Amino acid sequence: MLSAYRALLYLYPREFRREFGDDMVALLREQRADEGTARVAGRLVLDLVTTVPSSHLEAHMSRASAPTLAVVLVALAVVFAVVGGPFGLVVAVAALAVATVTWRRSQPIVADASGGRWWKFLAGGVGLLVTLIVVTTITGELPEGGWFVAMTAMFTSFALIATGIVLGIASRFRTA
Amino acid sequence: MKQLPAASMHLVLALLDGELHGYALMRRVEELSDGSVRMGPGTLYGTINRLLADGLIVETTDAKDRADDDERRRYYELTPNGRAVAIAEATRLRNLVHRVAGHLPRIAPA
């Protein structure tokens, strides 16, 4: 049974297996000695079925990349909402929901959490938008390449503002 | 505070009394839950991995002399933040039980 389990550990992500593989086999050995093979085997199958997919999901969605993913999703939501019509609005709402969940998942767990960092997104977005307005007002007519940069900056500022608003509302509900 | 997933909550509460190695941690969870929570190796070490990444627990294997432990076991204990989270979680659960008990007249007194 132990050698079979050791082979099944290859179903887990490599990093996880390297870090905890030996400990998992040792734990199973102790469990089997205490409870018997039959009782442990049934639970082990359920354990594998539930933890292998989640460990792969966690390995691919690292906490460091989650905030970036949240911003990209909000940017996509803004683009879909602006140019996608009714269908685009549905996609935008779905993207905002996923962004909120992704963001929440990435947040560190602390006992005295209060408010989060939503206002930084809001301030950043407003700051970028104001800067863009000031620059385009001063420079006047933009060259052809400048329009692309200006539009990108404008959509980014909208995305940051929308992210700030969504996260601010989410943090209100969380602390209520 | 972001609510802990069930498995994480059980582990941080089990570590409130001090450091434990994997198997002892699993048995402590079982004991605290009156036998209703039995973790397999994947659940236990998956949760330990998550708690380590969140900075709620830390490995203490090399921090102390383990002369009495003939096996090379890895020990874990709560960080200060992990302890604060565990206490907050225990308080939340106590308050929840307290409120619910008031609405259940037939509940047996503790």
Image (spheres, coloured by chain):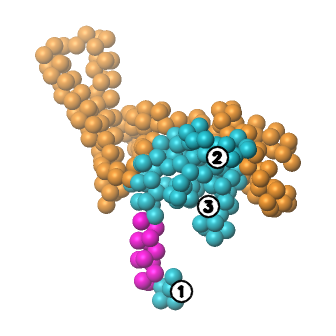
Q: Do the residues bearing badges 1 and 2 touch, measured as CB atoms within 8 Å?
A: no
**Which subunit holds the residue at mark 2?**
B
Q: Where is A129 relative to A102, above or below? A: above
Rendering quarter of residue A141:
top left
Residue at numbered disc 3:
B29
At which x and y percent is residue A33? 82, 56
Q: Where is A120 relative to A34, above or below? A: above
Q: Please provide the residue range marked out in magenta.
A: B91-103
A137 displayed left or right of B51: left
Distance, label 3 to label 1, CA atoms, is 23 Å
Rendering quarter of residue A31:
bottom right
What color was chain A assigned in the picture?
Answer: orange
Q: Say few, some or many: other residues with alpha carbon within 10 Å of mark 2 (under 14 / 14 to 19 / 20 or more).
A: many
Which amino acid type is shown beneath numbered disc 2?
A: Tyr
Which amino acid type is shown beneath numbered disc 3?
A: Val
Query: What label sits on residue A110 in the rendered view?
Result: none
Which amino acid type is shown beneath numbered disc 1?
A: Ala
A5 displayed left or right of B16: right
Please check whether the numbered discs 1 and 2 fall on a single chain: yes
For the colour cyan, the matching chain is B
**SS under mark 3:** helix
**SS under mark 1:** loop
Determine the residue located farthest toward the bottom in the rendered image: B106
At which x and y percent is residue B94? 44, 70
At 62% from the left edge and 61% from the top edge, which residue is drawn?
A: B29
Residue at numbered disc 1:
B108
